Image (cartoon, helix red, strand yellow):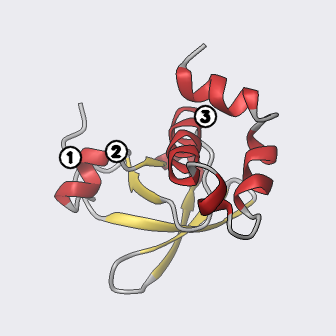
């Protein structure tokens, strides 16, 4: 079991972690940012998207923009580009942007 999975498991699962982070003043009680980082890694590994997650297309080599995830509609996801334009694409085309991609501001080479 990976460390982020163990942390989430110790708190009672992913949904329980979300509930914990929604508590008022949670940042004063515990390392909430650390838990958020573990939850992001969990989402990356399990292809779970939540509002505001940064995602990239993995199916089109010419598409290098980073999008912000908005919602899921059936097998599609709604994403917003930096300019505010909204698109609906098949969910299977997308994955979470890596830390390196976020830092670079674009999807890095596929391969």
C-alpha span from label 1 to label 3: 20 Å
Residue 52 drawn at (x, y percent): 53, 67
Mark before the other along the chain sequence, 2 or 3? 3
Taking the spot 60% from the left edge, 34% from the top edge, the residue there is 46
Q: Residues within 10 Å of mark 3 (few under 14, many from 20)?
A: few
Outermost front residue: 28
Mark 3 residue element: helix
The answer to whether residue 107 is visible is no
Residue 63 drawn at (x, y percent): 27, 59
Quarter that holds the N terminus: top right
Question: Are the residues flagged by discs 2 and 3 in contact, CB closer than 8 Å?
Answer: no
Taking the spot 66% from the left edge, 55% from the top edge, the residue there is 29
Q: Which residue is mark 2?
A: 98
Mark before the other along the chain sequence, 1 or 2? 2
Residue 108 drawn at (x, y percent): 20, 46
Mark 1 residue element: loop
Mark before the other along the chain sequence, 1 or 3? 3
> On screen, 110 above or below 31?
above
Mark 2 residue element: loop
C-alpha span from label 1 to label 2: 9 Å
C-alpha span from label 2 to label 3: 14 Å
Q: Nearer the viewer, mark 1 or mark 3?
A: 3
Q: Residues within 10 Å of mark 2 (few under 14, many from 20)?
A: some
The answer to whether residue 6 is visible is yes
Question: Are the residues flagged by discs 1 and 2 in contact, CB closer than 8 Å?
Answer: yes
Instruction: Name the foreground residue: 10 vs 90.
Output: 10
Left or right of 58: which side holds 9? right
Q: Which residue is mark 3?
A: 46
Instruction: Give the number of the disc on residue 108.
Output: 1
Residue 83 drawn at (x, y percent): 33, 85
């Amino acid at each position: 079991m990976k460390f982020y999975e163990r942390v989430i498991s110790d708190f009672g699962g992913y949904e329980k972690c979300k509930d914990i982070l929604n508590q008022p003043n949670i940042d004063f009680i515990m390392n909430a940012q650390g838990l958020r980082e573990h939850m992001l890694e969990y989402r990356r590994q399990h292809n779970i998207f939540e509002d505001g997650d940064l995602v990239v297309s993995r199916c089109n080599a010419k598409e290098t923009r980073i999008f912000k995830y908005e919602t899921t509609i059936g097998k599609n996801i709604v994403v917003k580009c930096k300019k505010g334009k909204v698109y609906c694409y098949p969910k299977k085309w997308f994955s979470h942007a890596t830390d390196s991609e976020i830092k670079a501001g674009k999807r890095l080479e596929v391969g």
